[in-house]
Image (cartoon, rainbow, N blue to C red):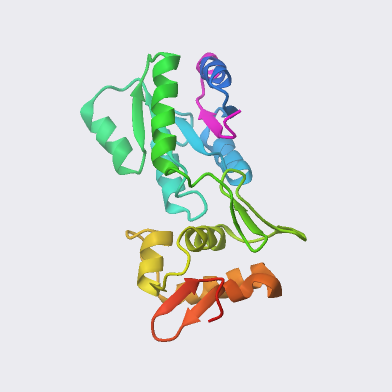
Amino acid sequence: MTGKTVLIVDDEAPIREMIAVALEMADYDYLEAADAREAHALIVDKQPDLILLDWMLPGTSGVELARRLKKEEATADIPIIMLTAKVEEDNKIQGLEVGADDYITKPFSPRELVARLKAVLRRATPAGVDSPIEVEGLTLDPVGHRVTSPEGALTMGPTEYRLLQFFMTHQERVYTRSQLLDQVWGGNVYVEERTVDVHIRRLRKALGDKYDHLIQTVRGTGYRFSTRAA
């Protein structure tokens, strides 16, 4: 298996089934939802790696759900491919404007869908980023979204996880609060610089006495991740 999970959100069971078969053949795990409410619950609970989202859903539309997911911190980074029977250019633009990563028009072939899905996942996961990173026994697994130590799993929130992942892939370099906001929160999100300090404190607490020294404060500048003594 690829280790990647795809959520299929479509109110038509035959389409979900056709996509599920294509994903299975391409070695992807999958989840299914028939409407936005069911989809949102699965997304929060299971954190899929990618969402195939139908434009026309009963109740809340696919575009509305995409807009909501991109606004929520815990789900903003999950790639979305919109599925739709609408071929009009303005619909395509609307889908991309709310943050969808790609757009595929029905009817589509399973092969085309899987090829587009792989391309979006490649963009979302740069080369090497899906390999586990280990420092002094502290291991971050980007595929499983887990952080472990020899004593067991460490519990932390999604922002602390993203901070740690950024630090572990950019070791021994000092970053200002502003740079961390751009890299971890995204440049288009308005967050106070002091928010970084709050999440750094939470991250150190989650790492515990054994690893909190790895996150070093550099006075007057910002923070760095280092195995060397500060």
Extreme right residue here? Answer: 151
Q: Where is residue 81 in the image (x, y as percent from the top left)?
A: 40, 32
Looking at the image, residue 67 lies above or below residue 219: above
Q: Could you say which quadrant of the image residue 117 lies in?
A: top left
Residue 10 forms part of the magenta stretch: yes
**Quadrant location of residue 28?**
top right
Q: Nearer the viewer, residue 81 or 84?
A: 81
- 133 left or right of 150 in image: left
154 or 109, nearer to the observer: 154
Query: Can the viewer see residue 55 in this picture?
Result: no
State which quadrant residue 79 falls in: top left
Kindly identify the residue that appears in the image at 37 percent across and 17 percent down. 106
- Does the stretch in magenta take in 11? yes
Q: Residue at x 70, y 72 (%)?
A: 210
- Give coordinates of residue 107: x percent, y percent: 38, 14
Q: In this view, does 171 lie above or below 125?
A: below
In percent of width and height, residue 215 lies at: 55, 73
Q: Position of residue 93 (x, y in %)?
A: 25, 36
Inspect this view and state whether residue 205 appears.
yes
Q: In which quarter of the image is the N terminus?
A: top right
Label tally: 0
Identity of the residue drawn at 56% across and 57% down:
158
Which span of residues is magenta-colored? 1-16
199 on left or right of 149: left
Towards the viewer: 181 or 216: 216
